[in-house]
Image (spheres, rainbow, N blue to C red):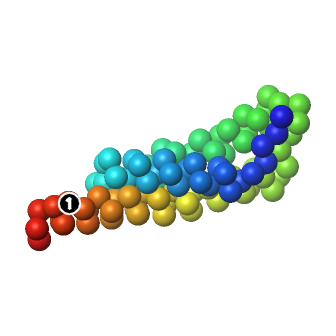
């Protein structure tokens, strides 16, 4: 079984970074690093372990998963800040 859909991976990275950005909005960049680092590591481990090897483009493309993570983490952080400001009446 092989799942080669990078868009699904980007969706999972974005969703998890949104949730983490909402929960802890102070430094959203740390969620990008925490979540995003596992995508290239997983691709590399797949290359070492599995018999069906990912292509070089897939490995380099896995680094692009940081971009939806950035959007999600900062979007979640901004959403939390806006909701807190609305709740406090500022």
Give coordinates of residue 61: x percent, y percent: 72, 57
**Is 49 located above or below residue 65 in the figure?**
above
Q: Report the residue at 46% width, 51% height from top.
A: 17
The residue singled out by tag 1 in the image is 84
Nearer to the camera, 29 or 16: 16
Instruction: Quadrant for the C terminus, please.
Output: bottom left
Q: Report the residue at 86% width, 39% height from top.
A: 53
Give coordinates of residue 81: x percent, y percent: 25, 62
- Tell which residue pokes out farthest to the bottom in this image: 90
Does any portion of residue 29 appear in the rendered image?
no
- Tell which residue pokes out farthest to the left in this image: 89
Nearer to the camera, 57 or 10: 10
Q: Residues within 10 Å of mark 1 (few under 14, many from 20)?
A: few
Does any portion of residue 18 appear in the rendered image?
yes
- Tell which residue pokes out farthest to the top in this image: 49
Q: Is 45 left, or right, of 67 in this rendering?
A: right
Give coordinates of residue 18: x percent, y percent: 43, 54
Give coordinates of residue 57: x percent, y percent: 81, 56
Q: Is 18 left, or right, of 27 in this rendering?
A: right
* SS at mark 1 in the image: helix
**Is 3 located above or below residue 7 in the figure?**
above
Instruction: Quadrant for the N terminus, please.
Output: top right
Total labels drawn: 1
Q: Report the residue at 79% width, 28% height from top.
A: 49
């Amino acid at each position: 079984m092989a799942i080669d859909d990078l868009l699904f991976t980007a969706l999972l990275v974005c969703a998890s970074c949104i949730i983490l950005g909402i929960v802890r909005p102070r430094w959203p960049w740390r969620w990008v690093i925490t979540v995003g680092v596992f995508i290239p590591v997983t691709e590399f481990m797949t290359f070492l372990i599995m018999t069906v090897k990912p292509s070089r483009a897939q490995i380099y493309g896995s680094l692009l998963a940081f971009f939806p993570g950035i959007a999600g983490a900062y979007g979640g952080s901004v959403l939390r800040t806006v909701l807190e400001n609305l709740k406090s009446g500022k």
